[in-house]
Amino acid sequence: MLRVGALVSGGGTNLQAIMDAIDRDNIDAEVVCVVSSKDGAYALERAKARNIETAVMRKKDYPTSKDYDLALADYFKRRNVDLIVYAGFMLILGEAFVNQFENRMINIHPSLIPSFCGKGFYGLHVHEAVLKAGVKVTGATVHFVTAECDAGPIILQKAVDVLDDDTPETLQKRVMEQAEWVIYPEAVKLFAENKLEIVDGIVKRR
């Protein structure tokens, strides 16, 4: 069984979607621990409701960014985690963490990468930029995590129409419901079934 660890900072709706899909679709995976970058994240309550181990690890409590990265890596290693999912995690981790879990970390981004991604593009900022640009289609992307923000190999994407009367909030909600909550659990399932292979930086299905 695939042992999944989650990194969170907020409400944890994508974490909930993954946990629900594991139960509903009999995915051979289990969320074994959830780590939040801050106190009070509702994602922790979602985990506790399922008796999943939780922890709060705040970056400011460590002398350097590298110390934080190493502490996080040690936490997941001691719990024998096979896959780490970023579920609304608001920090960019460095190579001291990323290199220890190469091709074993995935993230979901609320746009069709390579559009509207990278540093500064998170949360409502993404949807504000989409509306300002006037594009007619947006969506979500699941990708492997690398040291470069939002630049890892793309696993899955799903498009969502942008409507004329959209606000950043309505667009965010629709992207979550129609794209994020659909393809993130699907990516976990593909990983659990060992169906993903990276060839020359591009994800192929086995």
Image (spheres, helix red, strand yellow):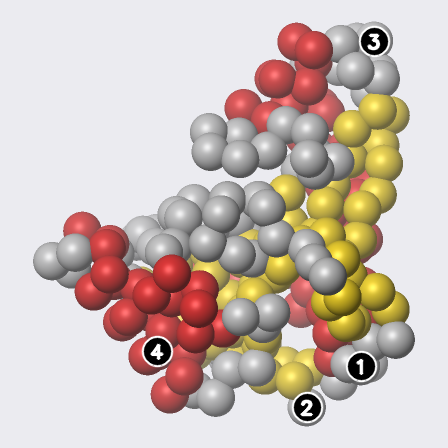
Whether tag 2 and tag 1 are in contact, CB under 8 A, the answer is no
Return the residue at label 2: 1
Q: Position of residue 10 (x, y in %)?
A: 46, 47
Residue at 20%, 65% (x, y): give it: 67
**Residue 36 seen:** yes
Return the residue at label 1: 193
Return the residue at label 4: 75
Return the residue at label 3: 164
The kind of residue on which mark 3 rests is Asp
Report the Cα–Cα distance between label 1 and label 3: 40 Å
Q: Quadrant of the C terminus?
A: bottom right
**Dot 1: element:** loop
Report the Cα–Cα distance between label 1 and label 4: 25 Å
Which of marks 3 and 2 precedes in the sequence? 2
Q: Nearer the viewer, mark 1 or mark 3?
A: 1
Report the Cα–Cα distance between label 4 and label 3: 46 Å
Q: Residues within 10 Å of mark 2 (few under 14, many from 20)?
A: few
Which of marks 1 and 2 precedes in the sequence? 2
Indicate the quadrant where residue 130 lies. Answer: top right
**Dot 3: element:** loop
Report the Cα–Cα distance between label 2 and label 1: 10 Å
**Dot 4: element:** helix
The kind of residue on which mark 1 rests is Glu
Which of marks 4 and 2 precedes in the sequence? 2
